[in-house]
Amino acid sequence: MTATAPREEQLWSRCAGCASLLYRKRLRRNLDVCPECGAHSRLAAPERLRQLVDEGSLCLLPDSLPEADPIGFVDVLPYPHRLTAARAATGLTEAVVCATATIGGHPAVLAVMDFRFLGGSLGCAVGELITLAAERALDDHTPLILVTASGGARMQEGALSLMQMATVSQAIAGLREAGLLTVSVLTDPTYGGVAASFATNTDLVLAESGTRMGFAGPRVIRQVTGRALPDGFQTAEFLLRHGQVDMVVQRRSLRGRLVALLAATRADRPARPPVPRQESAPRREPPAGDGPDVVRSADGPDPLGERSAVRAGAADLAAPDPWDTVRTARHPGRPTTLDYLDSVFDGFVELHGDRLGGDCPAVVGGVARLDGRHVMVIGHQKGHTTAELVAHNFGMASPAGHRKALRLMRLAARLGLPVVTLVDTPGADPGVSAEEQGQAAAIAENILTLTVLPTPVLAVITGEGGSGGALALAVADRVLMLQHAVYSVISPEGCAAILWPDRSAAPQAARALRLTAPDLRRLGVVDEIVPEPATAAHEDPTETARRLRAALLANLLPLLDVPPATLVRRRRQRFRRFGSARVGARAGAR
Ligand SMILES: [Zn+2]
């Protein structure tokens, strides 16, 4: 029962719920809900818009953006071939359709995702289009309604797709500040980077009946935990029971619910002048800080990272194979956050707990001094031995860990302390209880909060920067990366399992994902590479700590004198520039 049934079957559809053979026109009249069993089939974005908005009110927003294949991704097919095929199959330009319209007479801006287009994946163009829609809502002083359907971030665009979680979240933050309602309507399925950002950090979250939503997919959770999943796991009813959505709505009631919510939020509100739009980011924003870099590539692109490697004093001038870098980044001897708290900082006082019922051992944080200045340090903690790794859940934060980090970030802002984060995680905890406790929303709220936190934020990728779990601590004014760390939208093994015939292609995936420090420096995801002593940090932790300390000071000191409003504005520009147009310009310039 999909919109892409073969031609000869278009008169009839078979229900995925009860297997009834249904006359398509009858099904369409019933909003693509099975009249026999009530199963809600997936809707194409244009049909969804038709069902939700007032007739004749729809005005599509422009969706033409420069072509972008920002990391030149190839698996068994080059990424542009997949894009072309998706366009031909759907008639859409991208995996989201944005529009202005009225709903029950109330004006709104809508962004509706379409799962048929590369699994509704969030890439630079999708992030840019939704951000533009949010900016339009801010300009027009109208609510924003997001209808989500996505498997997650688009791995063919590497870490740049991860950045879109921050870009869209900060646009949502802008609407929050302006007192404008944001609503997300979860539809089946909504997972990964979309679930862990704008699908759950809106004011209201509605789940259409039949939706499944979560941070980690059921297959991954089953693989990691080796256990069967509870009945109804991640369904709309599960989400409601665990406090993660405001309501579960049948499709036939969805429009009416939106009308009621839009009406309620407009009531008694005095007309407010439109909020001035944020200044748009220049294409090449100079670094926020003016401090000397330990290693800063010259202005031009540095495609092979050679200059960085030379300045880093690395013995091998040839770039190592990215798969070797992945293994170095995961080396059990690599210094952990607690090691750095001992060697780089002084007087660390650990603070525990999320104040909601948990204290996650995978995240450590507290106040410390850096060269005599007080800072809030928050980082993922792994360990060197198996017992340590198990005790700290391998550095995979639970929702309680993300909420502890959030509490410490907010506390730092209130106390006027800069925040230093140390990122070293394979990813957020993919477990049943993590999903029950709202892993996606916990990550989403951290990302949003960091985009507007009124205090300096400095992030360092020290080991593994694994997807949304890493980004939850890495939206910062300056992002540093140790030379042999990696930062990626998905693990090479996970990427290989999805895009290659099997997981043994992880080394190829590692190369395709552009997850090394020189690659990310070139893409602008990382501002500076902190060189490691030969051959890597685990061989000489003392020297590594000395270099990290110097890099932290050089980057932090210039931020301390910047007024908070200026800091936040520059941080927003930093993440805003990852939009498709800019990335397209970068790709074109290569
Ligand atoms: Zn049915």
Image (cartoon, rainbow, N blue to C red):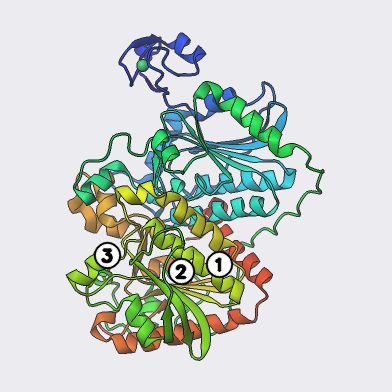
Measured as percent of width and height from the top left, residue 395 is found at: 31, 65
CA gap, disc 1 and disc 2: 24 Å
What is the quadrant of residue 184 in the picture?
top right
The answer, for residue 85, to whether it is visible in the render is no
Residue annotated with mark 2: 526
Residue drawn at the location 60% of the way across and 50% of the way down: 172
Residue drawn at the location 29% of the way across and 70% of the way down: 382
Question: Label 3 is placed on what type of residue?
Answer: Phe
CA gap, disc 3 and disc 2: 24 Å
Q: Which mark is residue 224?
A: none
In the image, which is nearer the foreground, mark 1 or mark 2?
Answer: 1
Question: Above or below — where is 202 with respect to 577?
Answer: above
Answer few, some or many: residues within 10 Å of disc 1's Cα (few below 14, many 20 plus, some between 14 and 19). some
Answer few, some or many: residues within 10 Å of disc 3's Cα (few below 14, many 20 plus, some between 14 and 19). many
CA gap, disc 3 and disc 1: 26 Å
Answer few, some or many: residues within 10 Å of disc 2's Cα (few below 14, many 20 plus, some between 14 and 19). many
Measured as percent of width and height from the top left, residue 575 is found at: 55, 60
Question: Label 1 is placed on what type of residue?
Answer: Arg
Question: Above or below — where is 116 with respect to 311?
Answer: above
Quarter of the image where the N terminus is located: top left
First of labels 1, 2 by sequence position = 1
Q: Which mark is residue 394?
A: 3
Question: Which residue is farthest bottom?
Answer: 372
Secondary element at tag 2: loop
